[in-house]
Amino acid sequence: MSEDHQNDDEREAVVEGVGKAQASRRRFLQVLGAATATAATSQADAAPWEEYFQQHYKRLTDEDKRAIFARLEAEVQDKYGVTVRINDPKPIDGVEFAYALNLQACVGCRRCEYACAQENNTSRSPEMHYIRVLQMDKGSLDVERSNTTYEGAVPTPEHYYQPVQCHQCRDAPCVRACPVNATWAEPDGIVVVDYNWCIGCRYCEAACPYFARRFNYEEPTVRPSEINPDQGYLSNRLRPRGVMEKCTYCLHRTRKGLMPACLEACPTGSRKFGNLLDPNSEVRQVIETKRVYILHEDAGTNPRFYYYFG
Amino acid sequence: MRDFIAFVRSSLGAVVHGSSAYYRWLAFLGVWMLLGCAAATYQFANGLGVSSLTDQVPWGVYIANFSFLVGLAAASVLVVIPAYVYRDAALYDVSILGELLAVAAMVMSLLFIVVDLGHPELFWHLLPMLGILNFPQSMLAWDVVVINGYLFINAYVVSYLLYSKYCGRVPNKRWYFPVLLLGVVWAVGIHTIPAFLYASLGGRPFWHSAVLAPRFLASAFTSGPALLIIALTVVRDQMHFPVREEALHRLRQIVGVAAVFNLFLTVSEIFVEIYPGTSHSASMRYILVGLHGHNLLVPYIWSGIALSVFAAVVFLARPLYSRPKVLLVACACAVIGVWIEKGMGLVIPGFIPTSLGEIVEYSPSFIEFCVSAGIWAIGAFLYTLMLKVAVPIELGTLRLPGAPNERIGLDPIRGAA
Amino acid sequence: MILVFVSASAASGCHRAEPRARRTPPPSATVTIVPRTPSIATYSCMQRCHTRLPANPAQRELVEFHTDKRLAHGTTLTWCTFCHQDDNLDRLRLIDGSLVSFDDGHRVCSQCHAERYRDWTRGIHGVTTGSWRDVAQRRSCTACHNPHDPHRTQFNALPPPSRERGREQEEHHE
């Protein structure tokens, strides 16, 4: 199992600052972990303690990560009987991801919502969707007048449709809010959550102006047959109860060059994704040639998500 | 050291002996505490799914109580300032009761935060060095610092004062006065930081208001001393602790001014939201008249406003407040009014409608109710036990064997000299 | 105590979400146009049918063949031969008379819809899937729009997530 990960394009440990202090801290935790491990009668009993004392993602070495990924893979195998592969693709230099969404073209069919749920292993019961599609009144940009529970034939003559998901803000209020740094923006702009570091206070959820973050109030449930085995540690791996999760622009796909699942599922081509730093990318073309607007721009979040009419 | 062991032993002795009314009161609280512990255990085992919180309304009765309780701690600073800075002897006599109330309030605040966490067992992630405290970026990190700090400051000061008096010594100003003054400064933080926790969220227009911190201060200066008036009356009648009329009078003056000012700030907020009728007024409309047919909180909010108005009228009219019973009722009304306004009345509408315009209403589940009641019972229990030790020490009846049985430090300035 | 806070803030300050200095972006994706011919069901037989029955270029009401084809594409485009070459049905024709493959159908569309076409070449309009970095596949106009009758049709949306927490009490509001 660990050999698999050797070739994996693993994220470099972004261990900043006081290396010494962190090393000693890690040693302390290792000693603590070892003490509890020896106290435990069997190897299996050590796992919960290892998990409990697991450090923040940015403080993990590549070796730590391999062990953790192997443990998580084994847990899924035990619980669901499904073989999954947890990888951790790193941000690509010279890449800043952004999304553009064509409000003229979107018909509100919710294909993106379901494709997202399937790709990202979000809970089916209680159901959790990262994307909300708003049915908007023509003649208004006011989301408060929108309806998110519409059904039946779309598009209707009176409405247009506005899907909303995580905007991967440059000045993300959720990142600022988190008391333990369990959520942060990666160098490619993706705001991620360390599911093993989150303490579940939900301040980030209160801070988000896009209703983009979700909390696992209950144990997430996904049928074994529906589990997507291609899993990113910081994105679509199966989450524990009591932690936050959110859209990551499918970083386990996009950091490998693929498009996000919601884009692939869209039958109308409303969704445009790409590298904001590449002048030829579709998103850059949209920003440069179309009239673009930002949802809740007054919130000062500077998102990497643009709406346009075209 | 031996003195300290004697102090602990005497304290325990004071706590376990009491009248039958005292035991009945403890038993009553004990039942609620057990119920609360059972509910909290159930919640810990089954997750926050047992609450009625949702992604739309992620904070409910726990955070509501937290917001209220940080305000209740104002009972401390509002007796400490007159007693120690303005040398008010009447309030000095009762200042320790105010500080103990702050200790109980801080303990309850912390408990309400803990039960609101999805993973309370991972609290070590908050500890600097071992974990990561996102300070100074996160307002919640600030909150953790100010609440723990305030708890520490108050607990230290009262412990030192009580221990010194128990030993028959005049408390040495050098050992407590700087910390006491730090507590006065810290009190500014304890009331404004929780307000900033909400007001700093630009995406929640209902909270994103500069007047929120002043409202927190005004409502804290209402609820804290109002509850202290009730507590002092009970202590005077049940534990024969002499409380001077001037002390109650001074507190009533403070509560009166604060209650009126709090109402004024609330009215200002309502006016600014409602009159221009911007889309940002949706939350205010939701609590006052309901929104798109959703009006779960409307009667609740209006009863809170009615209680606050009634209390303010009593505090202003001499024929009313001069009757002790009416004053007590008014104090209770003021506390409950603030509890409604600063609790669920502040937290829930911040999420309704959501930032995408959805409306999902919230009312606490049975488990949330039991956990909350349990934490309140813990706070009341703690306060009762602390009073049971503090009152006899203050009266001079509980002393280290051999120490003089007289009251100490009626005038703190002279006493410390 | 204050020192502890300062050091804590310094440590957590490092975790602040600041993207690193950028290097030049990787090269842009190569865009390929998904060929239309494999997905046109009648493509292989068009020329065969009309070898036996030469196309009648006269504009009239169709009663025998192609009765299922409603031609409702604006006011200019009123007859088959506007886009189809009547004596070579494997090809489409441009206004200047030159012939193009069905795989280059977008060139026919571009003659009128110049602005849309420009947006499409830039990836602003239309469906592009695959990779944002390596090779992207772009659908041609007629993959989505029926050239004979290009009005937008309705279809059913997938249901809103009904088993979501708090959904059961939520009501639709207008």
Image (spheres, rainbow, N blue to C red):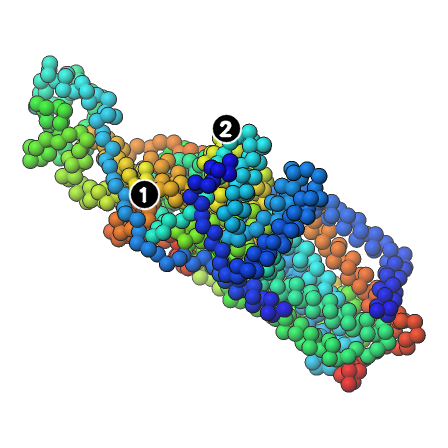
Three-letter amino acid code of the residue under disc 1: Trp
Q: Give how far apart the Cα atoms at labels 2 and 1 are.
A: 29 Å
Q: Chain of mark 1?
A: C
Residue drawn at point x = 73 percent, y = 82 percent = B87
For label 1, the residue is C132
User: Looking at the image, is A161 positioned above or below residue B182?
Assistant: above
Residue at image location 80% in from the left, 82% down from the top: B415
Which image quadrant: the C terminus of chain B?
bottom right
Q: Nearer the viewer, residue B87 or C143?
A: C143
The relative height of residue B270 versus residue C137 in the rendered view (above or below) is: below
Q: Where, by quadrant of the figure, is residue C157 drawn?
A: top left
- Residue A263 falls left or right of residue C98: right
- Residue extending farthest left: C96
> Mark number for residue A225?
2
Residue type of the residue flagged with mark 2: Ser
The relative height of residue A154 versus residue B316 in the rendered view (above or below) is: above
